[in-house]
Image: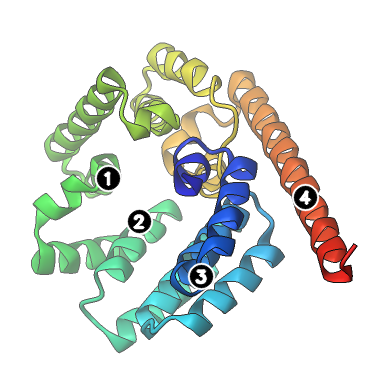
Amino acid sequence: LGSIYALELIDYVEGLTLWQKAYHLDKSYLAPIILESHYDAFLNGRLFAKADSFRIEFFKLTKNTHQDYYQALDWTDWCKNDIKAGIDLALKAIEEDPGSRWALEYLTERYSCINDFENSTKYLERYIELYGINDWEKKKNAHRLAYILYHQGKMEEADKYFDLEIELCKRSIETEDLSASRGLSYYDLFAVYSFLGDFEEAFRHLRSLRQVDFYPAWLMTYFYIDPLLDNVRDDSRFKDFIEEAELKLQREQEMVKTWLDIRDMNLQVSDSGT
């Protein structure tokens, strides 16, 4: 239930409360899951110091590889909007394991986000060589592939993958799957149509995205750095949306901080025996 509330419904306070109850029921079995879930919840609420403390405790309890550790740190840097630090970590992962699937995927997308298409293409080609183009499509990242192909001058292929992304997003909205309920499909449609210059359609989907109560930190990073949005960054409607998104995040942060204060007070009372 904690995962459903925090990671699917984006209700971190309720999710954290349920995770705490689960932890006290069976510490030995649930501790790693609870720690990782807390890390992710605090990370996406931009409470980075708290997230780091849970990440450290999680890795103390689990037998994870260097790849797992690099991936967690890379994700943290993405949520902090520190693209360069994330790229450096993914490159370290590639040094240790040239076939690291997550690192190849991350480097492909991260380099495209800063318009370094030479490196983006290099890692995309290596990814496809090892895992195939179909694997990339399954990740609902067709628009990221399309963006790279567009800058390679492969317009027909780019259009094919932009169309595929639009189709996948509309299908998720029609079936009301998780991507739609969290606003992710609306965001991807907004991004694709913005890049293609269909602003009427783009802002129609932005209006739907605005109905979401809260945007996690990783999605906020896309709002700020996604090159697919370059055509609308100066549009007052998008600027207003960003301001509103920040206010929603601040409200969520305050709710989580209040939850932490209440929890700490309860723990102090419990420890004192009163």
Query: The disc labelled 4 sits on which kind of residue?
Result: Lys
Which residue is the site of mark 4? 257
Task: Using the numbered discs, state the Cα–Cα distance from disc 4 to disc 3 in whole angstroms.
Answer: 22 Å
Q: Element at badge 3?
A: helix
Q: Indicate the colouring scheme.
A: rainbow
Numbered tag placed on residue 207 in the rendering: none
Rendered residue at 37%/17% (across/down): 198
Numbered tag placed on residue 31 in the rendering: 3
| Percent coordinates x, y for residue 86 in the rendering | 49, 68
Query: The disc labelled 1 sits on which kind of residue?
Result: Asn
- Which residue is nearer to you in this view: 124 or 243? 243
Mark yes or no: residue 171 visible: yes
Q: Quadrant of residue 66?
A: bottom left
Callout 1–callout 2 Cβ contact below 8 Å: yes
Task: Using the numbered discs, state the Cα–Cα distance from disc 1 to disc 4 in whole angstroms.
Answer: 34 Å
Q: Residues within 10 Å of mark 3 (few under 14, many from 20)?
A: many
- Disc nearer the start of the sequence (4/3): 3
Callout 3–callout 2 Cβ contact below 8 Å: no
Establish if 206 lies above or below 52.
above
* Image position of 47 (left or right of 200): right
| Percent coordinates x, y for residue 274 in the rendering | 90, 62
Which residue is the site of mark 2? 109
The mark closer to the camera, 1 or 2, is 1
| Percent coordinates x, y for residue 24 in the rendering | 59, 63
Which residue is the site of mark 1? 141
Q: Residues within 10 Å of mark 4 (few under 14, many from 20)?
A: some
Query: The disc labelled 2 sits on which kind of residue?
Result: Glu
Q: Element at badge 2?
A: helix
The mark closer to the camera, 3 or 2, is 3
